[in-house]
Image (tube, rainbow, N blue to C red):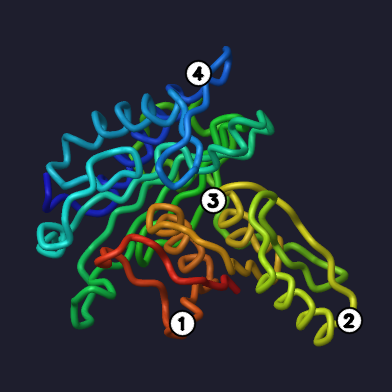
């Protein structure tokens, strides 16, 4: 199935996100334990069950899967991939633990880019899905087709991608704002973020804030609900890839602040540089 057209792969990714969402909500409905990984980030049974459910759904494509909760293959093996899936089964575990509903499933289809490869990356997202299971809210996009938002998404069950497009809202949508709006994380602020905010206050005078957890922030940016999303704090590749293609197809750009270029993926180390979406 590796040569299948993008819309068919998007359909598989959406169904995989729904499967991951169901697994998450089964755990969310009861009591659960929270463990800490070696980097002190939290992980729960929901992360692991979502990973298993998503991997099972994506298996039919025959493409490799790089998941936060899966095996992380060495760079020497990964750099040979032409296409692969990049997955965060539960993005926003801290929000999940807080039970505020602001968590998501992220699935991106990655493809080798046209730039010279190496330890700084050799891939870009060409399709992406972000699914918020609490609100049953889906954002999805694929290269050249546009970005879309669908509410009550899982109730539609399995649909061809183009049929889902016809039932969805094309992004961005008109969002009149009285003031410059900065989208910020609920859980991650840094001195660099505060300095960025201060610069924007000096440039624009009145500044207002929108707050949201997890990759759902990329959905808000794609909608046009904010002017900028600065991230001067650590993220991993699976945190941003789906959001990057969704924002790009909606007319926004996720820029690596170190290179001044769009973020690249499949790096030697899977940690991202800081970035800005605007």
Q: Dot 2, crowdedness within 10 Å: few (<14), some or many (≥20)? A: few
> Observer-nearest residue: 47 or 261?
47
Residue 165, placed above or below residue 235: above
* Mark in the foreground, 2 or 1: 1
Q: Looking at the image, which residue is at 46% across and 82% down?
A: 258
Please name the residue that numbered disc 4 is placed on: 27
Location of residue 168 in the rendering, given as x and y in whole percent from the top left corner = 53, 45
Residue located 71% across and 60% down the image: 225
**Residue identifier under label 3:** 215
**Quarter where residue 224 is shown:** bottom right
Side (left or right) of 162 relative to 201: left
Label 1, label 3: how far apart the Cα atoms are? 21 Å
Query: Mark 2 highlights which residue?
Result: 205
SS type, badge 1: loop
Badge 2 or badge 3: first in the primary sequence: 2
Q: Are marks 1 and 3 in contact (CB under 8 Å)?
A: no
How far apart are labels 4 and 2 at the CA level? Answer: 45 Å
If you read the primary sequence from the N terminus, does the residue marked by circle 1 or circle 3 appear first?
3
Q: Are marks 4 and 2 in contact (CB under 8 Å)?
A: no
Task: Measuring from the top left, give residue 94's x and y in whole percent.
Answer: 59, 39
**What is the secondary structure assignment of the residue under circle 4?**
helix
> Front-most of 58 and 118?
118
Considering every residue shown, the one lying at the far top of the view is 30
Horizontal relation, residue 111 to residue 178: left or right: left
Q: Please tell me which of labels 4 and 3 falls first in the chain.
A: 4
Q: Which mark sits nearer the N-terminus, 4 or 1?
A: 4
């Amino acid at each position: 199935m590796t040569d299948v057209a993008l819309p068919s792969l998007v359909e598989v990714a959406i169904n995989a996100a729904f499967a991951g969402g169901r697994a998450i909500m089964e755990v969310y409905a009861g009591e659960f334990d929270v463990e800490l990984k070696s980097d002190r980030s939290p992980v729960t049974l929901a992360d692991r069950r979502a990973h298993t459910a998503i991997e099972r759904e994506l298996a039919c494509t025959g493409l490799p899967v790089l998941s936060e909760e899966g095996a992380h293959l060495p760079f020497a093996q990964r750099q040979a991939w032409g296409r692969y899936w990049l997955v965060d089964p539960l993005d926003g575990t801290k929000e999940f633990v807080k039970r505020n509903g602001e968590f998501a499933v992220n699935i991106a289809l990655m493809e080798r880019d046209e730039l010279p490869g190496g330890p700084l990356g050799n891939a870009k997202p060409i399709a992406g899905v972000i699914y918020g299971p609490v609100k049953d809210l889906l954002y999805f996009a694929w290269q050249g087709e546009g970005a879309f938002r669908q509410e009550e998404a899982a109730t539609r069950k399995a649909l061809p991608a183009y049929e889902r497009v016809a039932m969805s809202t094309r992004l961005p949508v008109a969002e009149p704002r009285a003031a410059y709006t900065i989208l910020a994380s609920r859980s991650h602020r840094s001195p660099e973020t505060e300095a960025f905010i201060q610069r924007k206050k000096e440039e624009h005078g009145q500044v207002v804030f929108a707050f949201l957890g997890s990759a759902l922030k990329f959905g808000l940016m794609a909608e046009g609900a904010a002017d900028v999303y600065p991230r001067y704090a650590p993220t991993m590749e699976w945190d941003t890839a789906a959001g990057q293609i969704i924002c790009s197809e909606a007319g926004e750009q996720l820029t690596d602040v170190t290179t001044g270029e769009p973020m690249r993926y499949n790096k030697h180390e899977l940690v991202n540089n800081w970035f800005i979406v605007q």
